[in-house]
Amino acid sequence: MRAQAPDNPPPAPAAFSPDGLSRRTLRSEVLLVLALSLGASGVSSLISFVGALTKPGGLGDQAAHLNSSQAPGRPWLDLAWQLFGISTALVPVALVAHLLAREGVGGLRAVGFDRRRPAFDLGWGAVVAACIGGCGMGFYLLAHASGFNLTVEPESLPDVWWKYPVLIASAVQNAVLEEVIVVGYLLRRLGQLGWPVAGAVVASAVLRGSYHLYQGIGGFLGNVAMGLIFGLLYRRWKRAGPLVAAHALIDIVAFIGYSLLAGKVDWLPTPPA
């Protein structure tokens, strides 16, 4: 007797990506990683920007605060909160390393964030930081003067012994989180999902701009431009290491420079009193 065919045959398996996972699984993975990290930051930044736009007064009369005290007047508790925030912000990077390790290429080595080429990473990172950092500062001052940007306060920590080490650690954390996830991981996964190179680079750049939107229109546009450059450099070098170095240097100069210059020079905007 011939077996009767089932009324509802099982669906055909989804197409597989180069690392052996289905495309549907990879899409879900990317969405979850972003929802736990910078994608969520993008949504939060958009809400913050809408709030700033609808608040009485111009954007230039409002401030965006980075690296502020978490326990004013209690320096040891403040330090504990600062270190907690920096360390927990890097958990998505550990998750990405775990996910990439399934490809058998050594976790973050798959995106070129390792110790194989330190001189290359630091050297080119310094060159990129010098070029982008100066242009970025000029663009911020222009956007702020034009009323398209909030006043960015890079730091307002108390004058305690751990202030500058924490600012440096915060800068490195920002760099590792953003360049590993938004450039290395995202471009790798979008490529495995069949995205064209140009589309993937633009998507990465727009994502970078989205989570800087809390700074204003200038912050969004400036970081989209930076994202396009970083995406193209990653495609050329196949390494996130130089981008992490560049980003860390840019933020270190911004954080410490603001701390040393705020209120002492006329050209540097400071939050309204």
Image (tube, grey):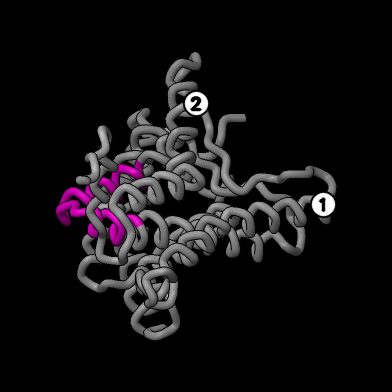
Residue ID at (38%, 46%): 28
Residue 16, compared with residue 64, is above or below; it is below
Residue ID at (76%, 56%): 79
Of residues 129 and 50, the one drawn nearer to the viewer in this rendering: 50
Q: Secondary structure at mark 2?
A: helix
- Dot 2, crowdedness within 10 Å: few (<14), some or many (≥20)? some
Q: Is residue 64 visible?
A: yes
Residue ID at (48%, 40%): 41
Residue where numbered disc 2 is placed:
61
Q: Amino acid at mark 2?
A: Asp
Is 205 magenta? The answer is yes
Which span is picked out in magenta? 186-209
Q: Position of residue 56 (x, y in %)?
A: 49, 14
Q: Secondary structure at mark 1?
A: helix
Q: Is residue 149 left or right of residue 154?
A: left
Q: Which mark is residue 162?
A: none
Is 156 magenta? The answer is no
Q: Earlier in the sequence, mark 1 or mark 2?
A: 2
**Chief SS of the magenta region:** helix
Residue ID at (65%, 66%): 165
Q: Is residue 10 left or right of residue 181?
A: left
Residue where numbered disc 1 is placed:
77
Point out the frontmost of discs 1 and 2: 1
Q: Position of residue 83 (x, y in %)?
A: 69, 58
Asked if the residue at tag 2 contacts the one at tag 1, i.e. Cβ–Cβ closer than 8 Å, the answer is: no
Residue 147, compared with residue 1, is above or below; it is above
Of residues 265 and 137, the one drawn nearer to the viewer in this rendering: 137
Q: Amino acid at mark 1?
A: Leu
